[in-house]
Image: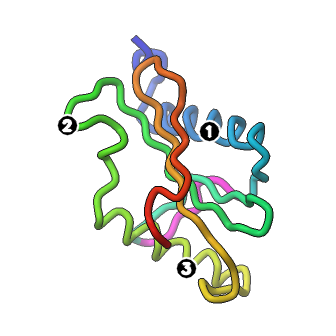
Amino acid sequence: MLFRLFPSKTAKGRHFEQDAERWLIKQGLSAVARNVRYRGGELDLVMRDGPLWVFVEVKYRQQQGFGGAHHAISQAQQQRLWQSARRYLAQQGLNEWDCQCRFDVMIYQGNQAPLWIKGAFDA
């Protein structure tokens, strides 16, 4: 079982975030930042896809219980991600009106290949 390979939940999360970053770079995106934390939210990955700022949430679930990883992002979490993205953009001297951005989700489920959902929810 995969979850026994990691000493902690943080180590497991870090592993899948690094894997997602490498995978997305191979798909043509550019890495900008990882694990950007704010009070009330965190951005797993910040990347660029040409002119687009891409904020990537990485999800892993060992099993499909409760709908699996693709059902793990609630409306409340989407709001926290959007607020964190606004803060990040503001730190770059931008806002949501100055640039294009997208929210993607990388899903890891069990031993299946990762699933990349571009534009998982509206910005």
Mark 3 and mark 2 lie on one chain; the one further toward the N terminus is 2
Mark 3 Cα shell of 10 Å, populated few (<14), some (14-19), many (≥20):
some
Does 37 appear in magenta? yes
Mark 2 Cα shell of 10 Å, populated few (<14), some (14-19), many (≥20):
few
Is there a contact, CB below 8 Å, between mark 3 and mark 2?
no
Label at residue 66: 2
Q: Camera-side residue: 12 or 108?
A: 108
Label at residue 20: 1
To which quarter of the image does residue 22 belong? top right
* Helix, strand or loop for disc 1: helix
Image point 74% across, 60% down: which residue?
Answer: 48
Residue 103: percent from the left, percent from the top? 53, 61
Label 2 amino acid? Phe
Mark 1 and mark 2 lie on one chain; the one further toward the N terminus is 1
Image point 74% across, 41% down: which residue?
Answer: 27
Label at residue 86: 3
Mark 3 and mark 1 lie on one chain; the one further toward the N terminus is 1
The main secondary structure of the magenta stretch is: strand
* Helix, strand or loop for disc 2: helix
Is there a contact, CB below 8 Å, between mark 3 and mark 1?
no
Residue 66: percent from the left, percent from the top? 19, 37
